[in-house]
Amino acid sequence: MQWKNKMNEYMLMVNDALETYIGEHQSVNEEVFEAMKYSLFAGGKRLRPVFSLAVCELLGKEPKQAIPYACALEMIHTYSLVHDDLPAMDNDEMRRGKPTNHIIYGEGIAILAGDGLLNKAYEIMIDHTLKLENPSFGLKAMKSIADASGTNGMIGGQTADLLNEGKKVDERTLAYIHHNKTGALIAAALKAGSYMAEVDDDEAEGWERIGYALGLAFQIQDDLLDIEGNTSEMGKPAGSDERNKKMTYPALYGIEASRERMDELTKEVQMFLKPYGEKSNFLVMLTSALMNRRS
């Protein structure tokens, strides 16, 4: 399929750039670098960076303009998974079909590897932004990512998720968790990609808004897979949400209502993309594929 070829092209760009960005290291800190690389190159889908590149290209710019911010997003996403898997949080032993970071390197190095990935993300964005002829768009992209990954974004969502384990959660709390824990970084990916295409704030906020819809649809499918999927396909243990007593969309609304909501959100994303015509074909197809995935 043509869209899969495009996906592979974007992923190759991201992987090549990540290899470059992870850089050299001294023997004294070799283990933390190895731990960083272990999780960064463990076979993730690269969805967030791909969204950034695709939006940038759809809006008429070379996708490589978004590469530093796209790679930073992937590093931030990866660090969050490393920390999420720790015994103090989800206590998961498998991720992407491999033992989790702390199982291989121990909890201390896993924590430092996550810290290293987060810090490296900002090094990359700052270094690139300082070199831009007009740094304002780079600064806006960077702020979008910082806002989305902080205590009013991803970390806030993770905190609410952690504090509400085993509790009966209402609709408002679950919406907050999904909006921030998953939606924020996906929304930031689209918004940052649009800023690197040098659009105005109103247009960038439109991409951010639809990114949140996409993020919720993605999370609902993730929740459904945790119930209906199997460990070999998913690369991580099925049923971990129930074991950790987490409130999910299907647990609150039921499986059928969850599917209906996911379909509504998918259509909302595709309607947003429709005015862009053929240029949006890749994002339309990718959105559809994500909602029908098995892992």
Image: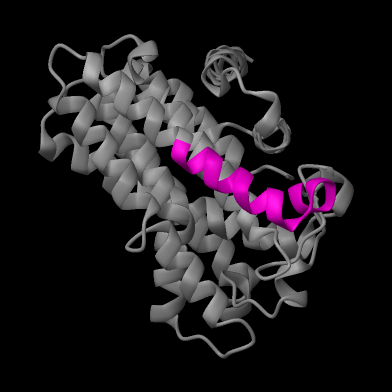
Question: Residue 234 location in percent, x, y?
Answer: 78, 47
The answer to whether residue 159 is above or below residue 155 is below
**Residue that appears at 61% across and 81% down:** 165
Q: Residue at x 26, y 19 (%)?
A: 59
* Furthest residue in direction bottom, as rendered: 168
> With respect to residue 232, does 261 lie above or below?
below
Q: Quadrant of residue 288?
A: top right
Quadrant hosting residue 289: top right
Residue 169 position, x and y percent, is 51, 86
Name the image quarter holding the C terminus: top right
- Who is closer to the viewer here, 256 or 113? 113
Q: Is residue 287 visible?
A: no
Left or right, 76 with respect to 127, comes to right
In the rendered view, does 289 fall on the left or right side of 241? left
47 lies left or right of 149: right
Instruction: Give the residues drawn in magenta, as a range.
Output: 101-119
Q: Residue at x 55, y 14 (%)?
A: 20
Residue 214, placed above or below residue 49: below
Count of numbered badges drawn on the protein = 0
Residue 61, image x, y percentages? 28, 11
> Quadrant where the N terminus lies?
top right
Residue furthest to the right in view is 232
Estimate the x, y position of residue 218 in percent, counting from the top left: 54, 50
Depth order, front residue of 221/137? 137
- Report if residue 11 lies within the magenta region: no
| 271 vs 239, nearest the viewer | 239
* In-image side of 289 versus 192 (left or right): right
Q: Residue at x 33, y 39 (%)?
A: 271
Vertical relation: 55 (above or below) 152: above
Asked if residue 102 shows in the view, the reply is: yes
Q: Chief secondary structure of the magenta span?
A: helix
